[in-house]
Amino acid sequence: MKISLITVVYNGEKFLQQCFDSVIAQTYPDIEYLVIDGGSTDKTLSIIQKYRSNIDYFVSEADRGLYDAINKGIEQATGDVIGILNADDLFDNPNVLDAIAQAFIMRPEIEGLYGDLNYIDPQTGKIIRKWKSKQANAEDLECGWMPAHPTLYLRKGLFGKLGTYALDLGTTADYDLMLRYLYAHKINALYLPILMVNMRMGGLSNRSIAARYSALLNDYKSLKRNKVPNPLIALLRKKMSKLGQF
């Protein structure tokens, strides 16, 4: 079973090499690695060229943002399962993709899976938050719970049936996709209780007050779009649920 792994990057010279090293270290042999660059102007392209023999598909061109770039990767992917590793992040250990593959192989009925994630300090690598997931149901999602998006792996065929990332919701596109797949369409998703990813703090949605406000509005739009009842309450619970991760 082939896993297609997508890394999207734009001017990511600071941490990209660590991301690449964590991919190369994976013990699972059947990996298709796709790197989508948004037209970087720093040393990103030279780092990519250094690792070019480990990359199965690469493009560098202007795009409409992170999720447009991810959609490009999905379109090019040929694997049975698709996952994403952000350019600032890294796998927790070399056996992550092997565990994911074995879960899909042993459980052919599952359409997707997700696991656990640590938020780490960008500079020191110290753990700031622990995102411990669970086997969720519709009620959990109605209460604002969500899995950690960087741990989400989905069978490729789902994207053709249920769509890719919406480009009108800013940084909330990942939340919208998870609501669409897990809540609106109720795909058969498995919680795999392993630590998958160490994610650096400081994402796009947290860079300013304006970005936080925009993300909040788009979260609400996503809840409404996917017909989650009492969206304001769900939104409040979503924000409060993060407190227990520190």
Image: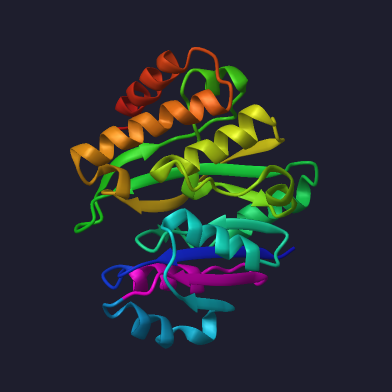
Callout count: 0
Task: Point out the image quarter for the N terminus.
Answer: bottom right
Give left or right: position of 108 versus 51. right
Identity of the residue furthest to the right in this view: 108
Q: Determine the image quadrant of residue 11.
A: bottom left
- Residue 96 visible in this rendered orientation of the protein: no
Is 66 or 203 nearer to us in this picture?
66
- Above or below, 86 against 27 in this view is above
- Give 111 or 209, whichever is nearer the viewer: 209
Say which residue appears at 31% left-offset and 43% top-offset: 205
Give the image quarter of residue 179.
Answer: top right
Front residue of 94 and 118: 118
Residue at 35% from the left image edge and 67% from the top image edge: 10
Q: Is residue 215 visible?
A: yes
**The C terminus sits in image quarter:** top left
* Residue 199 image offset from top left, x and y in percent: 36, 52
| Residue 160 % position (x, y) | 72, 51
Give the magenta range. Answer: 16-40
Examine the rendered structure and indicate whether residue 208 appears above or below residue 83: above
225 left or right of 120 in image: right
The question of residue 19 being in magenta is answered with yes
